[in-house]
Image (cartoon, rainbow, N blue to C red):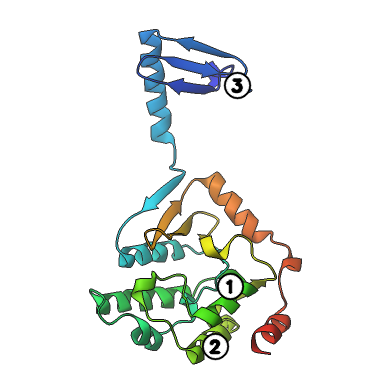
């Protein structure tokens, strides 16, 4: 609310009333004075113009969404990708995309190019991936690539699934992969987070509509919370590479 209203830092404003509240919400001031309401509306608009959006809903076709992800990748900072299913985007290649992308997709060739460019960019990043052992084993069992809407692709065969999982351990292709011993969150209602010190993208599934929704994270405090969470996960939560390979490949 500003220095002049430090006693009442919170405000509720309607067309007919203004209510100012103390920081503990125990005291307040209610007025229907038109001049005061006008002044508070002007003050609110000034603060609104200076404020950053907490989140931004990302609309558009799948090509646009991957272009937006590409812009997020463009900054030079270390990044985290956090979701329980393994991130297969960094270990896919043109051959597998051509093989499994549904043939009748509209503008299929353009989409292939967008995906290949995105993957090439992704492989150049200072990226740490966090997934879970259950997520990897589920991918081996089902072949579901969680980054794609299900109608976009055919399930990879078992041989290709195992090849993709092997590539997860190739740091040159997949970056640094940390495999959790236990899930954080629910694989059936999974959130996908890509975060940098400056911005992020949160993706979640809407099962009733069989679509993925993207939300751009822009507010610095919110971005810091997500980034600090990923950066400070205890090493005890993860398998060593040797342990993980033994469980997966026997």
Residue 103's quadrant in the figure?
bottom left
Residue visible at 52% across and 60% down in the picture: 189
Residue 216 on image: x %, y %: 43, 53
- Residue occupying the point 59% across, 19% down: 22
- Identify the image quadrant of residue 241: bottom right
Assign a secondary structure to mark 2. Answer: helix
- Is disc 1 in contact with disc 2, using a CB cutoff of under 8 Å? no
Image-based side of 176 in relation to 57, left or right:
right
Name which of mark 2 and mark 3 comes first in the sequence.
3
Q: What residue appears at the point 36 percent right and 75 percent down from the top-left corner?
A: 115
13 or 48: nearer the viewer: 13
Could you tell me which secondary element the residue under label 1 belongs to?
helix
Single out the residue that lies furthest toward the top.
33
Marks 2/3 in contact by CB < 8 Å: the verdict is: no
The mark that comes first in sequence, 1 or 2, is: 1
* Residue at 62 percent of width and 73 percent of height: 134
What is the spatial separation of the Cα atoms under label 1 and label 2, in whole angstroms? 14 Å
Q: What is the x, y in percent for residue 111?
A: 30, 74
Q: Which of label 2 and label 3 is nearer to you?
A: 2
- Please say whether residue 51 is visible from this viewpoint: yes
Within 10 angstroms of label 2, few (less than 14), some, or many (20 or more) residues? Answer: some
- Which numbered circle lies on residue 162? 2
Q: Which residue is mark 3?
A: 25
Vertical arrangement, residue 233 with respect to residue 156, above or below: above
Coordinates of residue 245 in the picture (x, y in percent): 67, 85
The answer for how far apart the CA atoms under marks 3 and 1 are is 44 Å
């Amino acid at each position: 609310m500003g220095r002049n209203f430090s006693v009442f830092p919170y405000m509720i404003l309607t067309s007919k009333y203004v209510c100012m509240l103390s920081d503990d919400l125990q005291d307040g001031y209610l007025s229907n004075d038109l001049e005061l309401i006008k002044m508070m509306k002007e003050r609110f608009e000034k603060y609104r113009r200076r404020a950053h959006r907490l989140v931004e809903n990302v609309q558009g076709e799948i090509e646009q969404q991957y272009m937006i992800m590409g812009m997020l990748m463009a900054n030079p900072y270390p990044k985290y990708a956090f979701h329980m299913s393994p991130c297969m985007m960094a270990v896919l290649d043109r051959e597998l995309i051509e093989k499994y992308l549904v043939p009748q997709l509209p503008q299929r060739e353009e989409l292939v190019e967008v995906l290949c460019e995105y993957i090439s960019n992704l492989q150049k990043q200072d990226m740490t991936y966090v997934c879970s052992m259950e997520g990897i084993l589920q991918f081996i069992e089902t072949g579901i690539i969680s980054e794609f809407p299900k109608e976009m692709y055919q399930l990879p065969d078992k041989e290709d699934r195992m090849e993709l999982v092997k590539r997860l351990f190739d740091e040159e292709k997949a970056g640094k992969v940390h495999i959790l011993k236990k899930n954080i969150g629910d694989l059936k209602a999974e959130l996908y987070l890509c975060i940098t010190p400056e911005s992020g993208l949160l993706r979640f599934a809407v099962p009733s509509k069989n679509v993925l929704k993207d939300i751009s994270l822009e507010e610095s405090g919110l971005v810091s919370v997500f980034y600090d969470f990923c950066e400070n996960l205890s090493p005890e939560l993860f398998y060593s590479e040797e342990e993980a390979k033994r469980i997966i490949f026997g």
